[in-house]
C-alpha cells in the first residue's frame, strides 16, 4: 500500500517518520509552505492510504471534499500525536483502513479504534475478506445486505469454485448452488448475489499490424459476451514483442488501465504446454502461437480460453494461480 503521512507538530512529525520507516511512504509537515488542502488533494488522488498524525476532526475536514465512493477512496487513518490510538476513518474494508489502523496500532502499542459493526463484534466481513483475497466487489451496494444477515446471527451462503484454506467462520456456509448471498466468480452472473471477482485474468493478444483500438475493443466485447467473462477479472494483456509499439494495441490497453507485457518469439517458443499451432503465425512471427503462449507466460497460470478468433484479432485468456484463505 502506497502511503502518505501528514503531521502538524514536531512531536507528530517524529511519530510520522517512525511510521514511515516501518510502513514506507512520504512524510509532510503541514505548514504555510505545505497547506493542508493542497497536500490532501494531491495525496488523495495518488496514494492508497493517508495517515494524519493529529486530531480526527482535522483529518475529517481535510478529506471531506474529496470523498467519492468507498470503492475508490483511499484508506484514511488518524493517529493522535501521542501514539495512543489509531482510528480508521474512510474505506475501512475495501480500502484497507481497518487493517492499516491495526498494523499501525500494533507497531506503536496503541489501541485500534475500529467502529465497523462486523469487526467490532469479531464477525465475518465479506468485503474485507474479498479485498484480502484480491477480489473486486462488483456490487458494493449489496455488501450491507450480506453484512446485515451476519449481524442478525444468520449464516450467509458463499459459493466459491476454489478450495479455501483454514477454518471456515461460523457465519459462513459454503454452497455450490447458484442461489447464494455471495459468489466468487470469473463470470457475469444475472442474480442477486454479491459477486466477488478475482483479479486474475490475462488477455493474450495476436493482431495484424495496424489493427485499430476500435477493432480490438469490438473483438474484446464480443469475447466477453460469447464467453460470459467478467471484464473486472482482467488485469493485463500480453503479446509478442513485435507488437510492443502497436498504437492501436497500446491505446486499447491504456483505455483498460492494463500493462501490456511482451515476449520474444524465442521465449514464447520455449514455453511448455499444449497450444494451438498456426503455420502462418509461425512464418510471420517465428512462433507457432502468440495469444495463448503470451497469456500463459504473463499470467504464470493456465489457459482458461484457447485461441478465439475475431476480425483480424486473436485472443486467449489465461488464469493466474489463485489462493483463498479464511485466515487474513
Image (cartoon, grey):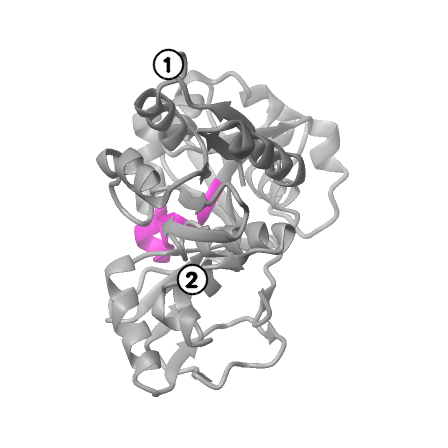
Q: What is the quadrant of residue 252 in the picture?
A: top left
Residue depicted at 31% across the width and 74% down the height: 146
Q: In this view, does 181 lie to the left or right of 175?
A: left
Q: What is the quadrant of residue 15 in the picture?
A: top right
Residue 263 image point, x, y percent: 65, 29
Residue 219 showing in the rendered view: yes
Characterize the local packing of mark 2: few (<14), some (14-19) or many (20 or more) Cα atoms within 10 angstroms. Answer: some
Mark 1 and mark 2 lie on one chain; the one further toward the N terminus is 1
The boundaries of the magenta stretch are 223-235
Instruction: List the residue tagged with mark 1.
Output: 32
Residue 198 belongs to magenta span = no
Q: In what element is the residue under mark 1?
A: loop
Characterize the local packing of mark 1: few (<14), some (14-19) or many (20 or more) Cα atoms within 10 angstroms. Answer: few
Q: What is the quadrant of residue 242 in the picture?
A: top right
Q: Is the magenta stretch mostly helix, strand or loop?
A: helix
Instruction: List the residue tagged with mark 2.
Output: 114
Q: Distance between the residues labelled 1 and 2?
A: 33 Å
Q: Is residue 90 left or right of residue 17?
A: left
Amino acid at each position: 500500500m502506497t502511503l502518505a503521512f501528514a503531521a502538524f507538530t514536531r512531536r507528530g512529525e517524529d511519530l510520522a517518520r517512525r511510521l514511515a520507516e516501518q510502513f514506507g511512504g512520504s512524510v509532510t509537515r503541514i505548514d504555510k509552505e505545505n497547506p493542508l488542502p493542497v497536500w490532501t488533494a494531491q495525496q488523495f488522488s495518488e496514494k492508497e492510504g493517508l495517515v494524519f498524525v493529529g486530531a480526527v476532526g482535522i483529518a475529517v475536514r481535510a478529506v471531506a471534499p474529496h470523498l467519492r465512493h468507498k470503492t475508490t477512496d483511499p484508506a484514511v487513518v488518524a493517529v493522535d500525536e501521542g501514539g495512543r490510538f489509531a482510528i480508521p476513518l474512510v474505506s475501512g474494508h475495501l480500502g484497507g483502513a481497518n487493517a492499516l489502523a491495526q498494523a499501525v496500532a500494533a507497531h506503536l502499542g496503541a489501541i485500534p479504534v475500529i467502529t465497523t459493526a462486523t469487526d467490532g463484534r469479531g464477525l465475518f466481513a465479506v468485503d474485507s475478506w474479498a479485498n484480502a483475497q484480491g477480489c473486486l466487489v462488483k456490487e458494493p451496494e449489496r455488501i450491507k445486505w450480506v453484512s446485515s444477515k451476519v449481524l442478525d446471527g444468520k449464516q450467509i451462503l458463499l459459493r466459491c469454485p476454489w478450495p479455501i484454506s483454514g477454518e471456515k467462520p461460523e457465519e459462513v456456509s459454503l454452497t455450490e448452488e447458484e442461489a447464494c448471498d455471495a459468489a466468487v466468480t470469473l463470470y457475469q452472473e444475472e442474480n442477486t448475489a454479491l459477486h466477488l471477482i478475482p483479479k486474475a485474468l490475462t488477455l493474450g493478444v495476436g493482431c495484424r499490424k495496424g489493427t485499430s483500438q476500435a477493432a480490438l475493443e469490438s473483438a474484446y466485447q464480443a469475447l466477453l459476451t460469447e464467453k460470459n467473462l467478467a471484464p473486472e477479472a482482467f488485469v493485463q494483456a500480453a503479446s509478442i514483442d513485435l507488437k510492443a509499439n502497436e498504437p492501436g494495441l497500446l491505446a486499447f490497453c491504456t483505455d483498460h488501465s492494463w500493462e501490456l507485457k511482451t515476449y520474444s518469439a524465442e521465449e514464447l517458443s520455449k514455453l511448455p504446454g499444449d497450444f494451438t499451432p498456426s503455420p502462418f503465425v509461425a512464418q510471420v512471427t517465428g512462433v507457432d502461437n502468440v495469444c495463448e503462449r503470451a497469456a500463459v507466460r504473463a499470467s504464470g497460470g493456465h489457459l482458461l480460453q484457447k485461441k478465439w478468433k475475431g476480425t483480424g484479432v486473436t485472443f486467449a485468456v489465461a488464469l493466474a494461480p489463485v489462493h483463498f484463505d479464511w485466515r487474513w
